[in-house]
Image: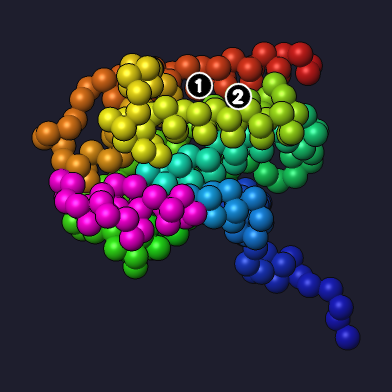
């Protein structure tokens, strides 16, 4: 009995390319771990939903009309945005923390190249952020949040796009501190910036000092741009939002790149 395969038979066996197989397996594993992560469920989904129910559901102002939706929808969009930004920032931070643990060196021994690893992490972070926002949107749709079909889609897509600057910020933070410090710093930056930008409650209901500070905070441009399709582009759009996003994106991406290459030189 012949126990070996011929060269032709071996070549005929379908095998995935190492690069594609490694990326697909890694991305699926990473995404699966995130869905079952208590921090993701509690921090990125639980807290935004809790604040949504507290501030938006069954309130006297919930059904008041606001542009292409109602007040409840405006609050829902803000909570979904917060959950998505938190997810994207922490996901990128975890990627950077892997450098301190030696995980990046381990990648050199696998079929997964480092550029592919970073690409998979970016895709995973955006997918996770999208899932966090989607859960809030679904709950909002069944509890009284009303938007036009275009506003539903536009606000959701803008949330995903605006996650990129926060991912860069998380990547920068993860390269300079340990996990405990990174978690604290990232959480505080997001909480304080969200409050000062009007993500949790309208700036008109806050003091003059907060209103004066808001345009200079990292999330001011993001939350206003995300809510613009709901409130109405013609009546609300301001180029200062784009400038705010552009400036902070440049700072975060530049800082992340600087720290990445500087740390790379010290590791040689």
Disc 1 secondary structure class: helix
User: Are the residues tagged 2 and 1 within 8 Å (C-beta)?
Assistant: yes
Looking at the image, residue 247 sits to the left or right of residue 243; the answer is right
> Residue 183: x and y, percent?
66, 35
Image quadrant assignment for residue 9: bottom right
> Residue 85: x and y, percent?
48, 39
Residue shown at the point (68%, 24%) measured from the top left: 175
Looking at the image, residue 56 sits to the left or right of residue 173; the answer is left
Q: Quadrant of the N terminus?
A: bottom right
Residue that lies at the very extreme toward the left in this rendered image? 234
Residue that lies at the very extreme toward the bottom in this rendered image? 1
Looking at the image, residue 39 sits to the left or right of residue 104; the answer is left
Image quadrant assignment for residue 257: top right
Is residue 229 shown in magenta? no
> Residue 204: x and y, percent?
28, 30
Which residue is more in the foreground, 220 or 22? Answer: 220
Q: Relative to 171, is 215 above or below?
A: above
Residue shown at the point (72%, 67%) measured from the top left: 10
The residue identified by callout 1 is: 252
Residue shown at the point (38%, 21%) measured from the top left: 210
* Among the two numbered marks 2 and 1 on one chain, the one whose residue lies closer to the N terminus: 2
Looking at the image, residue 28 sits to the left or right of residue 213; the answer is right
Residue shown at the point (48%, 46%) measured from the top left: 83
Q: Which mark is residue 172?
A: 2
> Residue 221: x and y, percent?
33, 27
Q: Which residues are magenta?
A: 49-76
Which residue is more in the foreground, 81 or 27? Answer: 81
Which class describes the residues within 10 Å of circle 1: few (<14), some (14-19), or many (20+)?
A: many
């Amino acid at each position: 009995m012949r126990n070996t395969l011929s060269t032709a038979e071996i070549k005929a066996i379908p095998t995935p390319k190492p690069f594609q197989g490694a990326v697909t397996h890694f991305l699926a594993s990473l995404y699966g771990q995130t869905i079952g992560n208590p921090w993701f469920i509690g921090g990125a989904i639980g807290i935004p939903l809790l604040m949504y129910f507290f501030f938006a559901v069954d309130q006297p102002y919930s059904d008041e009309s606001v542009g292409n939706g109602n007040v409840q929808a405006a609050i829902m969009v803000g909570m979904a945005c917060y959950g998505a930004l938190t997810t994207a920032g922490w996901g990128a931070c975890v990627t950077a923390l892997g450098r301190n643990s030696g995980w990046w060196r381990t990648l050199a021994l696998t079929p997964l190249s480092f550029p592919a690893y970073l690409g998979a992490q970016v895709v995973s972070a955006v997918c996770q952020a999208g899932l966090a926002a989607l859960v809030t949107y679904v709950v909002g749709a069944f509890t009284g949040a009303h938007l036009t079909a275009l506003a539903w889609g536009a606000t959701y897509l803008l949330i995903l796009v605006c996650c990129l600057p926060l991912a860069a910020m998380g990547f920068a933070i993860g390269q300079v501190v340990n996990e405990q410090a990174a978690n604290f710093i990232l959480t505080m930056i997001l909480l304080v910036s969200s409050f000062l930008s009007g993500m949790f409650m309208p700036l008109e209901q806050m003091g003059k000092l907060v209103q004066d500070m808001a345009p200079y905070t990292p999330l001011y441009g993001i939350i206003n741009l995300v809510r613009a399709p709901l409130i109405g582009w013609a009546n609300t759009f301001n180029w200062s939002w784009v400038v705010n996003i552009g400036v902070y994106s440049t700072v975060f991406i530049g800082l992340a790149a600087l720290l990445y290459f500087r740390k790379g030189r010290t590791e040689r």
